[in-house]
Amino acid sequence: MHPKNIHQGQYNLVKLSVVYPELKHFVFTNEYGTESIDFSKPKAVKTLNTALLKLHHDISYWEFSDSNLCPPIPSRADYLYYLNDLLAESEFKDKKITLLDIGTGATCIYSLLGNSLFNWEFVASDISEKSLANAQEILDKNSLTNAISLRKQNRKKLILEGVILENDYFFASMCNPPFYRSKEEAEKTAKRKLRNLGLDKSTRNFAGKSNELWYKGGEVAFLKNYIKESVLFQKQVYWFTSLISKSENLPAIYTALKQVKPKEVKTIEMKQGNKITRFVAWRF
């Protein structure tokens, strides 16, 4: 993880259970004599991440449907830490930073973490009225409506148009795009994960609404649309960024970027244990 990520190392389940007692129901001592939780159980994972938000980020209310994706807090924070490094390189010192959070979802997680860690302000968008309503409740109950505002994207094929308004300026946009091409692909992948975990296929160990998990054409198609639209808003966003789930998608993304001729393109790798993720950033 990023060296400054406050979620480095093992979870302090004792402290987490104190601030969020519900977590105690999921803590057990494993075969190595270490306290842990069962990460194959969605409820346990959701409870752990809720406790992390409460202990480290002073988020007292974070409720959402079990059918929505539950974001892992440490890796979500990593994107923000590396994005902060990128902004620091751009010499935005002493300026009030406002970011655009594309596809914020029901959990509003990137906006919550970015505000907590760096005091950034956010405009957060989504195409789902239900997700935005849930996100608004989270903001209301944590008194964050002055720092984070929500906007609905009314056209499913658009990403930036209709969300960025005439007088807006964002130091960066950020996005965790849907990475499956269809519901069938998402379900097939989920079944393979269950099989690898030795669980029954009827067990649900993942969640996610259609707009969270899949997009026609998959991640590459989404990014191509995002890149194409970024040209229209090059004077209103300094850095456009997005997570890229698979390294094999990078060549197609680079090709799409070459076509719009940005001034600068960066690929920033992030390591979380044995897993390597990355985000691509470009500016005009």
Image (cartoon, helix red, strand yellow):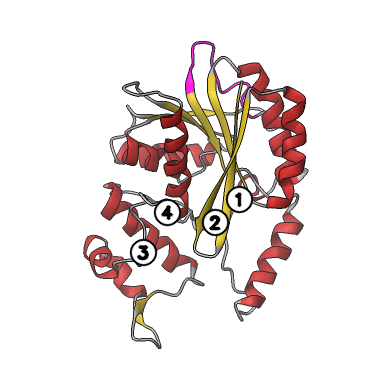
Residue located farthest toward the top when viewing the structure as drawn: 167
| Of callouts 3 and 4, the N-terminal one | 3
Residue located 67% across and 31% down the image: 226
The front one of 26 and 227 is: 227
**Could you tell me how many numbered marks the image carries?**
4
Query: Nearer the viewer's eye, disc 1 or disc 3?
Result: 3
Magenta part of the chain:
159-170
Judge the density around disc 2: few (<14), some (14-19), many (≥20) Cα neighbours within 10 Å. few
The residues tagged by marks 1 and 2 sit, at their Cα atoms, a distance apart of: 7 Å
Contact, CB < 8 Å: mark 4 with mark 2?
Answer: no
Q: Secondary structure at mark 4?
A: helix
With 206 as the anchor, is 225 left or right in this view?
right
Task: Kindly identify which residue carries mark 3.
Answer: 9
Task: Kindly identify which residue carries mark 2.
Answer: 67
Q: Which mark is residue 73?
A: 4
The front one of 221 and 47 is: 221
Q: Which mark is residue 217?
A: none
> Type of residue at label 2?
Ser
Contact, CB < 8 Å: mark 3 with mark 4?
Answer: no
Q: Which mark is residue 209?
A: 1
Contact, CB < 8 Å: mark 1 with mark 2?
Answer: yes
| Of callouts 1 and 3, the N-terminal one | 3
The residues tagged by marks 4 and 2 sit, at their Cα atoms, a distance apart of: 18 Å
Judge the density around disc 1: few (<14), some (14-19), many (≥20) Cα neighbours within 10 Å. some
> Is residue 39 something that shows in the picture?
yes
| Of callouts 4 and 2, the N-terminal one | 2
| Of callouts 1 and 2, the N-terminal one | 2
Contact, CB < 8 Å: mark 1 with mark 3?
Answer: no
